Image (cartoon, rainbow, N blue to C red):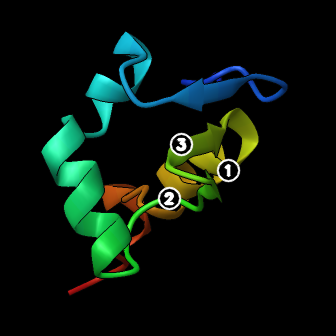
Amino acid sequence: MPNLFENDRCYVLGDPELDIIGDRDKLAQWRHKMKGPAFYRLGRKIIYRGSDLNEWVDAGRVDPAMRGPS
């Protein structure tokens, strides 16, 4: 599967591309709980690197074919 996010781009809150993983409130909850994708905090600005977002998405990948015999 191709990357959902551009690896060499930085995303900030309000970018519509971030809506695919959660709304602004959900992302804030994850940051508070230290969950979700890696992020940078520059003052009050939150920045997500595209490569970090893609890594986080890939970590949540489930392949039913890899279950093995029951």
Residue 47 in the image: above or below residue 66: above
Real-space Cα separation, disc 1 to disc 2, in angstroms: 7 Å
The disc at residue 37 is 2
- Would you say 39 lies left or right of 33 here? right
Residue 1 showing in the rendered view: no
Residue 43 in the image: above or below residue 45: below
Q: Nearer the viewer, mark 1 or mark 3?
A: 3
Of callouts 2 and 3, which one flags the residue occurring earlier in the amino acid sequence?
2
Q: Position of residue 38 (x, y in %)?
A: 59, 62
Secondary element type, mark 3? strand
Callout 1–callout 3 Cβ contact below 8 Å:
no
The residue located at (53%, 63%) in the rendering is 59
Residue type, numbered disc 3: Lys
- Report which residue position mark 1 lands on: 52
The residue located at (78%, 29%) in the rendering is 7
The residue located at (43%, 67%) in the rendering is 66
Residue 60 showing in the rendered view: yes
Residue type, numbered disc 1: Asp
Q: How dense is the environment of label 1, judged by Cα within 10 Å: few (below 14), some, or many (20 and up)?
A: some
Q: Nearer the viewer, residue 1 or 38?
A: 38
Secondary element type, mark 2? loop
Callout 1–callout 2 Cβ contact below 8 Å:
yes
- Report which residue position mark 3 lands on: 45
- Would you say 10 lies left or right of 28 here? right
Q: Nearer the viewer, mark 2 or mark 3?
A: 3
Q: Position of residue 47 (x, y in %)?
A: 60, 41
Residue 11 in the image: above or below residue 56: above
Instruction: Classify residue 36 by image quadrant.
Output: bottom left
Q: Position of residue 31 (x, y in %)?
A: 37, 67
Residue type, numbered disc 2: Pro
Real-space Cα separation, disc 2 to disc 3, in angstroms: 16 Å
**Image mark count:** 3
